[in-house]
Image (cartoon, grey):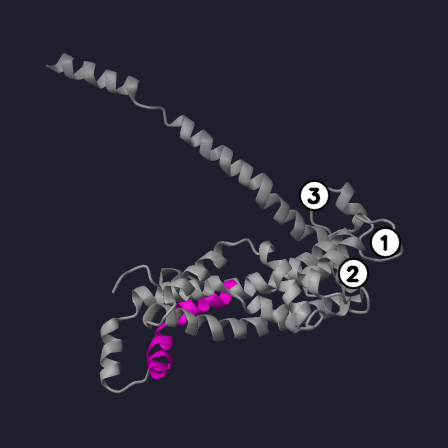
Amino acid sequence: MTQTTLFLTAVRRRVRPSRTLPFLVVGLLLALLLVFFVLPVIWLLLAPSKTAGEVVRDNPLSFGTFHQIATAWQHLFAFQDGAMTRWLRNSAVYSGGSLILTLAVSVPAGYALALTKFRGRKTLLVITLVTMIMPQATLVLPIFLELNRFHLIGTIWSVILPFSFYPFGVYLVYIYFGSSLPRDLLSAARIDGCTEWQLFSRIALPLAKPVVGLVAFFSFVGNWNNFFLPYLVLPNSEQFPVQVGLNQLLTSTPSFNPVAGAGLNVTIPELALAILIAILPVLVLFVFSQRTLVSGMLAGSSKE
């Protein structure tokens, strides 16, 4: 009996799959992640601390001086008489204004689709879903023609109004109200004489703060990072948001466009600093809204 047991144990050890291969695969994936994602971010953080020559000659992951960061900052915000400041202000206006309209439209629309019955409700929901999965580039041409028809090209509304169209936010609110809002609570409120508007404003809306915060975050980030539409509808540099402004800054960098950038103080360190400044508002927003984002993502995950 003892020999049989020892034999079976030896066989199991021989046929047991090796654990070395999974560790090698995981290690390779982590190495690729480090090379293609982490190292470029580290380089971007360190580039403003060096001169353009040091960026090319020195160790890519070495730190320069704080004085060079201050110099890059001065050159950047002196570009075209403070264009960077105008671009940041424009982005804040476009993203903030469209966010207000997005919440004012998406939240009531999602509530209506989830909890009210009206003719054409299913058709409207299908249209919302189809529009949500369509690539944004496919809508740029019809939106441009529509804005041109109403003589809005080159105005602030040519950016804010299209940015406010956010079917994904409508769908998020629809999912939340359709799965997490207690029906008994609404029925009791109706018995007490609440109108549909009172149900929405006094009961549904306060309970929907997590998903409203989630919609607000995604809407703001998407609008802040949007490049294509503002690039088409805004002909004047004074009206550019920061993402379109970065493109103009890139064309003024001698390393990428020697002819256009001749005689300017905008080089690779200034360009790297501009990129960091452009992503800073989104990063700060993400850091301070993590709890809201987590609760919003979990909203609607359980059926009441």
Task: Tell me what residue is drawn at x 82 percent, y 66 percent.
Answer: 80
Task: Tell me what residue is drawn at x 54 percent, y 67 percent.
Answer: 165
Number of numbered discs visible in the structure rendering: 3
The mark that comes first in sequence, 1 or 3, is: 3
Label 2 crowd (10 A; few <14 / some 14-19 / many >=20): some
Query: Residue under circle 3?
Result: 60
> Which portion, as a residue range, is magenta?
196-218
Label 1 crowd (10 A; few <14 / some 14-19 / many >=20): few
Kindly check if marks 1 and 3 are in contact, taking CB atoms under 8 A apart as contact.
Answer: no
Residue 140 is situated, as x and y percent measured from the top left of the image, at 62, 59
- Magenta region includes residue 261: no
Three-letter amino acid code of the residue under disc 1: Ala
| Closer mark to the observer between disc 2 and disc 1 | 1
As drawn, the residue found furthest toward the right would be 263
Task: Tell me what residue is drawn at x 58 percent, y 45 percent.
Answer: 38
As drawn, the residue found furthest toward the bottom would be 193
Q: Is residue 265 left or right of residue 14?
A: right
Q: Secondary structure at mark 1?
A: loop
Q: Secondary structure at mark 2?
A: helix
Task: Tell me what residue is drawn at x 66 percent, y 47 percent.
Answer: 43
| Cα gap from disc 1 to disc 3, whole angstroms | 26 Å
Query: Residue under circle 1?
Result: 260
Residue 11 is situated, as x and y percent measured from the top left of the image, at 24, 16
Query: Which image quadrant is residue 212 in?
Result: bottom left
| Cα gap from disc 3 to disc 2, whole angstroms | 19 Å
Residue in the foreground of this view, choosing between 81 and 239: 239
Label of residue 221 in the image: none
Query: Residue under circle 2?
Result: 71
